[in-house]
Image (cartoon, grey):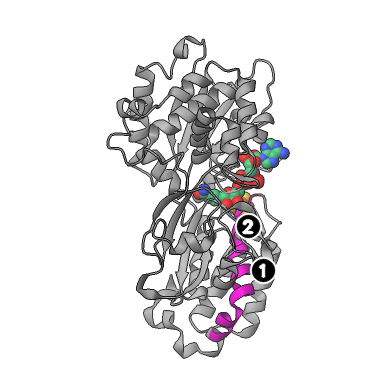
Amino acid sequence: MSKKLLLKDAHIEGIRYLETYRKQGGYTAAEKALKMTPDEILEEVKTSGLRGRGGAGFPTGMKWSFLAKPEGVPRHLVVNADESEPGTFKDRYLMEFLPHLLIEGMLISSYCLGSNVSYIYIRGEYSWIPDILEEAIDEAKAAGFLGKNILGTGFDCEIYVQRGGGAYICGEETALLESLEGKRGNPRLKPPFPAVKGLWERPTVVNNVESIAAIVPIIDITGAEYAKIGVGRSTGTKLISACGNINKPGVYEIDMTITVEEFIYSDEYCGGIPNGKKLKACIPGGSSVPIVPANLLLKTVNGEPRYMNYESLADGGFATGTMMGSGGFIVLDEDQCIVEHTMTLARFYHHESCGQCTPCREGTGWMHKILKKIEKGEGKMEDIDLLWDIQRKIEGNTICPLGDAAAWPVAAAIRHFRDEFEWHVKNPELCLTQNYGLANY
Ligand code: NAI
Ligand code: SF4
């Protein structure tokens, strides 16, 4: 059984409220942290090996150490709660059931980074969660954990919740900052990174909800103990939101030493595939990461079991591996059509492209159009090569990673399931989507 650090109290009735959270030891990590110096906290976070849980896996301690500290310029912590990656819903769970864990993590992080005003930027569609967060903020403030002179330390901190307007691109950190400043959410060119020039051009750390929540157990048990959990550079625990063709969809906390097979088939996690169907493929890290067929999902290129961690999932690079990403684990059984699935994703990325760069704005539209044609049974063999060519021209040629995120699912689908694309071209009369009318989607 995986060790639980974040969700250990999630089942306790009333844990959303301060009184119950305190009874379970809540805010003792903050009390401990506020007696430490900011540099000591930073050392703990670095020692823990925590990697950003939003998807990129960038070392959190390193990001914090990059924060510029010019004299007299305010600094900010911004929590990225714009969780919009298809298949990803772990931050929603954390915020809905354990809001004080996030607030406590924010208090410790804000103190460490020197942020007196910190923000939570939350996905607009999570319409019921800001009230939960604001209630928790009010409770924390009334108890002296936020506001002026927190716990008599002289440190002041306010937290504000900002609702997004429903655009996926605002989860990209620089688009998020633009939106938080009240502008259209267009990504900025990096560098400069937000750590140097972020919100209102001030040094800013943008971290995912789960990363900030993980700061609480790191301070609680120490960075060194946190680093002992997991394996290699995949330290600590990771939340996985599992969905698709599985018996038990939900949010699971794993310690990154379990195999993919165990995660899919064990009763502790996904509980297997309904109706005894066979596993066809999986997208383990949210829709932006490459799809992997079952044979490569259960073992690495070296024939080792594939584990649920950053390194093992990526084994083989883009040719045979995938990515841990945001931990949005989507399982597809033998009945799923890869072409239809890829078409649906292509539509999503086309719809969500901000339109600033030509390869993304035009390329995502072309990919959707061609995929729709193939799915409807109107495609030609050369369309498959055209599709391959377009995705290659998008990858690496755009301002933000949405371009890559749109290209990779198409590349991986053609690489691993080219026979299915060819089948659609050769058997137009059998293309089910045509009969169901789904290709107009
Ligand atoms: P990135 O690799 O560009 O950056 C990661 C973080 O490290 C950023 O905060 C960046 O500012 C910081 N960083 C990197 N180099 C730095 C340097 N030299 N100095 C200072 N800071 C530095 O990745 P990005 O664009 O932040 O995230 C992409 C990932 O987001 C994708 O892999 C995808 O899995 C994930 N994603 C997650 C979503 C969700 O709903 N959770 C939605 C869409 C994408
Ligand atoms: Fe906008 Fe796409 Fe360019 Fe990102 S890659 S800046 S979403 S057009």
Q: Residue tagged by mark 2?
A: 312
Q: Magenta segment, which residues?
A: 400-423
Residue 401 in magenta stretch: yes
Q: Quadrant of the C terminus?
A: bottom left
Which of pointers 2 and 1 indicates the residue nearer the eye? 2
Residue 28 in magenta stretch: no
The quadrant where residue 94 appears: top left
Percent position (x, y) of residue 4?
45, 42
Percent position (x, y) of residue 255?
52, 47
Task: Of the two numbered discs 2 and 1 on the same chain, state the one appearing first in sequence.
Answer: 2
The residue located at (61%, 29%) in the rendering is 44
Q: Amino acid at mark 1?
A: Ile
User: Pointer 2 and pointer 1: residues touching (CB < 8 Å)?
Assistant: no
The image shows residue 439, relative to residue 16, as above or below, that is below
Would you say residue 198 is visible in this rendering? no
Q: Is residue 85 found left or right of 289 in the rendered image?
A: left
* Residue extending furthest toward the left: 13
The residue located at (33%, 26%) in the rendering is 23
Looking at this view, is 20 or 344 the one in front?
Answer: 20
Q: Is residue 310 found left or right of 152 in the rendered image?
A: right
Percent position (x, y) of residue 200?
59, 29
Q: Residue tagged by mark 1?
A: 390
Looking at this view, is 234 or 408 the one in front?
Answer: 234
Q: Which secondary structure lies at badge 2?
A: helix
Mark number, residue 127? none
Looking at this view, is 411 or 168 the one in front?
Answer: 411
The image shows residue 302, relative to residue 224, as above or below, that is below
Q: Amino acid at mark 2?
A: Ser
Q: Is residue 60 found left or right of 88 in the rendered image?
A: right
The image shows residue 248, relative to residue 133, as above or below, that is below
